Structure formats: structure tokens, C-alpha cells
Image: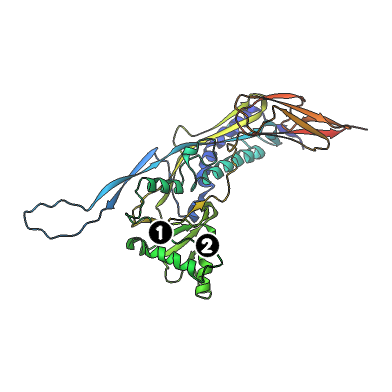
Amino acid sequence: MKYYTLSLQDVTHIKDKLAPDIIASAVLDNMKLFNDLYIHVIEDVEFAQTQIIFRRKGGEARRYKQGETLTATLGYMEESKLVITDIWTRHVQNLKNFREKEPFKIAGSNETYNAPVSEFLMREIGKQHAGDVAMNLFFGKEANGVKSPLGLYDGYWTKIDQAINAQRISKKFGNLVDMTPINDSPETQDGENYDNYVAWVNGWHPTLRNAEHVLVYMSPESERKIIESYMRKFTGFQKESNDSKSFRFFGMKNIEIVSHAIIGKGDRMFATVPGNLEFAMDEESNWNSVEMDHDQNDFNNLIFQIQSNAGARVLDINATKFCVNNGKIQQIEQLNGDYQHNTLTVTSNNEEWGKVTVSPEKTDYEEGETVTLTPAAESGYHFVKWSDNVTIDTRSLIYSGVPTVLQAVFEKDEE
């Protein structure tokens, strides 16, 4: 069976056809995650969607005489803005990876294509983009910058911290309630962690605590520690939720624990109601695109850049719908997106057959810096090519600022 390497024009055509699916992957590929976490997904929104939330103030009801004026102190309105930011992911592929066996069809008379290998590669690029977007849901912080794996947009923990710093979440307003730390200390008594959790729940605003359905977001380790404490106290008495997706304690059937690794590691948690966490994806903006360009030094290397618009919001942080504790939380693992580090990785297919010297050899390279790579074969072996199919031995690269991986391929001499 003969294989054909597609032309740049063919790959561009497939990219253009799949661009809408790649951009939408941030929502479509993560839909199960959004559903499991009760995150309300909003599509095709404008850059700043504002909703007005009515916040009640403290006060008292009073009788007054007819004709007497009285200033109303029921409450005030505040904006809850959904800010959508431009996000992007870069991915490098080699043109020679886009190979198809007959029969295949590109840019036919009806503008269709049939190129399964190339489509698979394109959709995998979309999956990486979707994964990058998802990893920012809780710990994303736009201030980290575009070269940070967690700098795409502000996630939920970041939004909560911003509201605390602005004193919109505080003990005074009742949407911040202290909780004794959850721990595995040998001194921890049976039922102690569970009792601490219950004490925190009892500190919520009554409207939140008695809502028809309450969600408590916590790390898997906190869930485990509290459930184990509960079971030790009540000798294994427990209750699963109706859909077996999460856990509910006996006597608190309206409160559902939502646990996922993406929430982080630690004992910080927050309670809210379904629909209060929102994720927005603007698929209509002109900023959305899937761009493709050549590596300036090797036209076989294609750099894909996906741009789309997304954002997250906690809609209502009033105590009647939201409460966070004073615990600590951190991300379990870092994201390995292509934009995480500006790294140049050079390897050999076998260190005993040959090695590569890099000049200058350093940890970090600046964009536009020239780097020289020289393969040196051991006795009885010879250099064949680089992993991107370039056959010249000593080569100079002008570092593009995009993570680059190259491998020198050595083979044994013929006898």
C-alpha cells in the first residue's frame, strides 16, 4: 500500500475545514467534566456579560406613623461580570506526519476531504487545547501571563480570592466561615474531621444550608478524610447520592459533595447551588482562529496556534448562595501545555551510537537567539538525519520561542 505525503495546501484545507471543531473542543471535549462539576456552560456570549445581583443589607423592620418618611435599607445592587479573555495554545507538527494511503481525497469539487490520518492529527491538536482550557478552571490566573500554563483566564479559586481581597467575601457578610483544618494527625479523634465539617455547614446562612440542592466543592483527599471520620463515628453508616456520582451524608440529603482532582489538594472548600458556577465560550468572535505557519528554519515544521475566547465566573457570592472556608488549596499537578516553557530539547536515538552538542548550552533561550546543533557519531556508526527529516548534520536554529524537540538519528555502519 503506497502512502503519500500531503502538500501544505492540502493540510491547510483540512485545517480550515476542522477549525470550528477544534475551537469548540474546549467545550465539547470537556462536557462530561462540566456536567460532573455542575458548571453551567454559556456559549456565544459577548466579551462582558453582566448580571445584576441584589445583595441584602442588615437592618430591621419598623412601624412608622402615617405621613412619616423612612429611608429604605433593603439592599443594594452589584454587578457580576463575566469577563472573556483571548486564550491560545501552540502545537508543533511535522508536515511529513500528514501522510495518507489511497484512496483519499482532498479539496474535491464539493470542497470535501477524506484524509483520516490528517484529521486524527488535527483533532488531537484540538484535544490538547481543550485540556489546557480545562486545567485553568480552578487555578487559572490571567495575571500569570500567556507563557504560563495557568495564565489562560481567571479560574474559580482566583475569582474567589479576588472577591476576598475586595472584601466582597468576608466573615462580616457571612460568605466566609472559618473551619478547623482537616488532617490525618494521629491525635485526630474518631469523628473529629466530620464534626469540623458539620460545624462549618452550621455556620452557613440558613437560606444556603436549607436550599433544595447544595454543592460542596472539595479536594478528593478532604472528601476521603471526612467520609472516613464519618464512618468511624457512625460505624460505617453512609449514603450514596441517587446517581452514584457523589456522596451525601445521612441527615444532610440536600448537600452533595462534589470532588475532583481538578479542584486541587488541601482542605479549602466552598458551598454553592447548582448553576452558580459558569463557564463561557464565545465561538462567534473574530478572534477565534486556527492558524498555521512554518518554522522559519525548517519548512517541514508546522506551528499551529489555536485562539478562542473563554472565561469563568461565580455568579452570585452572596451568603444565601455561597460560602467558602478558610482552608488551603493547591493544584495537584502542573499542566504540560506547549506554551508552558520555552524549551529546546535535543536528544539522540541512542547515546552509545552518537551524541549531540549544543552551542551555546544553557537552560533558557531567548526568542531570536541562534543555537548550533552538532551530531557526533561514535566509531562504527554514522549520523542519518534529524527527527524532522532534515539530513544536514550541523545546523543552526533561530529559536522561535516555541518549545522545540529534536532528535538526532544514528545508524550502524554497513559491514
Please determine whether, in this image, residue 245 is positioned above or below residue 55.
below
For numbered disc 1, what is the local secondary structure?
A: loop
What percent of the width, then of the height, locates residue 80?
35, 45
Nearest to the observer: residue 114 or residue 282: 282
Q: Residue at x 42, y 41 (%)?
A: 44
Q: Which mark is residue 188?
A: none
Residue at left offset 37%, top offset 39% = 48
Q: Could you tell me the amino acid type at mark 2?
A: Asn
Quadrant the C terminus occupies = top right
Say above or below: 401 vs 80. Answer: above
Q: Looking at numbered disc 1 in the image, what kind of residue is underneath it?
A: Asp
Closer to the chain start, of discs 2 and 1, is 1
Residue behind mark 2: 183
Q: Say which element carries label 2.
A: loop
Residue 296 occupies quadrant: top right
Tell me the CA gap for discs 2 and 1: 15 Å
Residue 402 falls left or right of residue 61: right
In-front residue for pair 321/12:
321
| In this rendering, position of residue 396 left or right of residue 125 | right
Which mark identifies residue 178?
Answer: 1
